[in-house]
Image: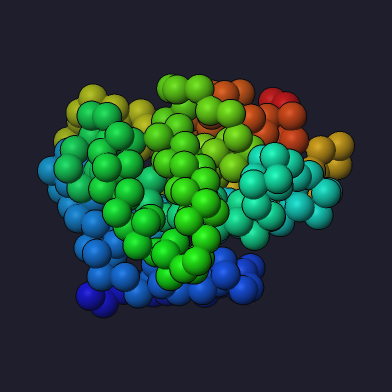
Amino acid sequence: MQKSYKENKLEDGILSKLSGKSKQIASLIFNDREIITLQNHSNIVSIKRLGYNDHGPVHMKKTALNAMIMFGLLKNKNIKFNLEKEELGNSEDSRISILLASLLHDIGMSIGRDNHEFLSVNLSIPIITRLLKKIYPKNIEKRTVIRSTVIEGIIGHMANRTITSIEAGLVIIADGCDLEKGRARIPSLLSNEAKAGDIHRFSAQTITKLEIDEGKNKPIRINVHMKESAGLFQVEKVLLPKIKFSTIKPFIELYATINNSKKRNYL
């Protein structure tokens, strides 16, 4: 299957932040025909059948890139993830867990929207098992722990069930940070008819850029730029609740900038 320019660019961005085993597993994912098919079919169901925004390969790769940026910022501040703190693995194992969860979290959309996080888990388990066996061929204990951590990240990304690890908490916010107008572009092109949930589409179209950088007082600063105040809906109803739910909330600064002038500080 031919990938879009944006997909290839996101893959290059993700790979540039990886090395060793995490880079190896990312390359396996990007060339796995089952994963590629599931990601693409998720968009067919989400956009063409249901009229939702992007839940396909671009969104999942954007989530993964966001996650890798935040992972690096936390690691630079010597914040340990749960696998390392609990002596179950190291930071590279945590990175792999987050990467897998980010790139698989919405494949359940290939079946439907309702409880899609549970559907994603069901579809992901054999894939996760298969990929981890290639990376950790002789270490069943590590494969088992990482698989559980990946599943927590997938099943928790809707911020409606309790999560306990920093790894899963990072996935939630990385997913919520995909707010920019491009995510709503295809549904807007396909239909101009009013329907329930359009506020998500129209508010997303006002978001021009989302930046993830080192914070002044906390490890991570998220700044959402928008051309109109309608974009505040995305910040206050989509991203902020996910941050408040997440285990990494104490490490986040959140700002919204309207028209390059008015700035709101949320966290």
- Displayed quadrant of residue 91: bottom right
Please state the horizontal and vertical placement of residue 4, each as a whole percent of the image: 33, 72
**The one of 116 and 207 positioned closer to us in this rendering:** 116
Please state the horizontal and vertical placement of residue 219, each as a whole percent of the image: 79, 43
- Displayed quadrant of residue 93: bottom right
Please state the horizontal and vertical placement of residue 50, each as a whole percent of the image: 17, 38
Residue for point 61% across, 51% down:
94
**The one of 106 and 226 positioned closer to us in this rendering:** 106
Please state the horizontal and vertical placement of residue 149, each as a whole percent of the image: 51, 43
Residue for point 32% across, 57% down:
127
Would residue 130 appear left or right of 85 to someone viewing this image?
left
Say how the picture is coloured.
rainbow
Quadrant where the N terminus is found in the figure:
bottom left
**Against 191, is 239 above or below?**
above
**Against 190, is 16 above or below?**
below
Quadrant where the C terminus is found in the figure:
top right
Q: Is residue 186 visible?
A: no
